[in-house]
Image (cartoon, rainbow, N blue to C red):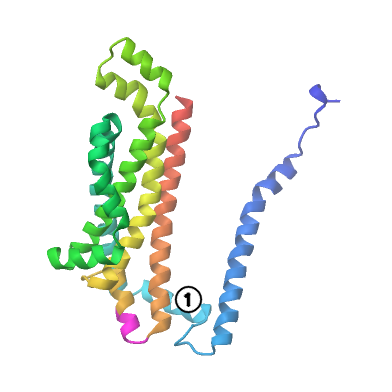
């Protein structure tokens, strides 16, 4: 009998166990397509709800269209610009608010106003000030910024209280506290905030594009398809947007996981 009364696990069983989530994921996707096809047959009109095969054909056609590639590139640049502006600003303000209670009280009304303002109101007001091209980026910044600030504040508050007292007792500088106490606590919160912010940024940018219709934008393509009553094309534009957002999210999740493994080894 093996040491400790445990039996070795068969390698074939391990392999089968690792394949189970992928199998169930595939079954879930097929089930969604089945529901979609069933709903399309019940609707009985491609103008109301097109079937998955018709949408897939239209999506393949869009992939080869030059205007779709330009629109995808334009939206992707707006999303990345929104992330690159809002993430550093949110982290900086979160650090100030988390380290100083007075600053935290000062910024709290700003965060409350942003959280309570409807997204559509933000888009329409920004359109009056900035025009169609800059509105999606500004809207993404305004909604992602408080998310990153809140995550940064939560990361600072999660730092070990005993270590805080120890650092204060030995009169370590703010730079040393940041390096050895706060940054290790902050990293998971910041990376988690960036992951959720990326998904939020795609949604907000495309929603703003649908309303203000800038040049070379996925949201503009959706709005044009809707105006022309091309429902299959509207679904195809939506699938392209979801695919782009999912791929960027997956790439970030992969990089995040790789970073965590490297950090554990260190």
Quick check: 226 above or below 113?
A: below
Q: Nearer the viewer, residue 203 or 61?
A: 203
Q: Which residue, given by chain and number where applicable, does mark 1 sit on?
A: 56
Let me know if residue 228 appears in the view.
Answer: yes
Q: Nearer the viewer, residue 156 or 176?
A: 156
Q: Is residue 138 left or right of residue 20?
A: left
Q: Nearer the viewer, residue 48 or 239?
A: 48
**Residue at screen point 37% across, 19% down:** 164
Quick check: 161 above or below 198?
A: above
**Residue at screen point 36% across, 87% down:** 229
Q: Position of residue 257 (x, y in %)?
A: 46, 40
Residue range (magenta) = 224-229
Q: Mark 1 falls on what kind of element?
A: helix
**Residue at screen point 78% across, 32% down:** 8
Quick check: 131 above or below 190?
A: below
The answer to whether residue 19 is magenta is no
Screen quadrant of the N terminus: top right
Dot 1 alpha-carbon crowd within 10 angstroms: few under 14, some 14 to 19, many 20 or more: some
**Residue at screen point 42% across, 76% down:** 235
Q: Position of residue 14 (x, y in %)?
A: 70, 42
Q: Position of residue 214 (x, y in %)?
A: 21, 70
Q: Quadrant of residue 65?
A: bottom left
Screen quadrant of the C terminus: top left
Q: Position of residue 98 (x, y in %)?
A: 30, 33
For the stretch drawn in magenta, what is the main secondary structure?
helix
Let me know if residue 69 appears in the view.
Answer: no
Q: Residue furthest top?
A: 170
């Amino acid at each position: 009998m093996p040491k400790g009364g445990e039996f070795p696990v068969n390698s074939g069983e391990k392999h089968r166990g690792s394949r189970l989530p992928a199998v169930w994921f595939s079954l879930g996707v097929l089930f969604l397509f089945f529901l979609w096809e069933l709903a399309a047959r019940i609707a009985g009109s491609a103008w109301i709800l097109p079937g998955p095969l018709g949408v897939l054909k239209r999506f393949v056609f869009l992939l080869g269209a030059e205007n779709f590639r330009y629109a995808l590139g334009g939206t992707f640049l707006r999303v990345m610009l929104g992330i690159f502006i809002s993430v550093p600003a949110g982290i900086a303000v979160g650090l100030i608010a988390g380290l100083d209670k007075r600053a935290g009280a000062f910024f709290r009304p700003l965060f409350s106003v942003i959280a309570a303002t409807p997204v559509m109101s933000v888009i329409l007001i920004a359109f009056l000030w900035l025009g169609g091209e800059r509105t999606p980026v500004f809207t993404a910044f305004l909604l992602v910024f408080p998310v990153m600030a809140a995550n940064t504040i939560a990361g600072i508050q999660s730092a070990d209280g005993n270590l805080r007292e120890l650092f204060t007792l030995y009169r370590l500088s703010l730079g040393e506290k940041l390096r050895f106490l706060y940054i290790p606590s902050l990293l998971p919160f910041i990376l988690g905030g960036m992951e959720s912010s990326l998904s939020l940024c795609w949604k907000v940018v495309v929603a703003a594009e649908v309303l203000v219709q800038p040049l070379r934008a996925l949201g503009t393509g959706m709005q044009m398809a809707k105006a022309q009553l091309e429902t299959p094309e509207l679904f195809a534009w939506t699938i392209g947007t979801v695919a782009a957002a999912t791929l960027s999210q997956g790439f970030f999740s992969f990089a995040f996981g790789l970073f965590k493994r490297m950090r554990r080894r260190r």
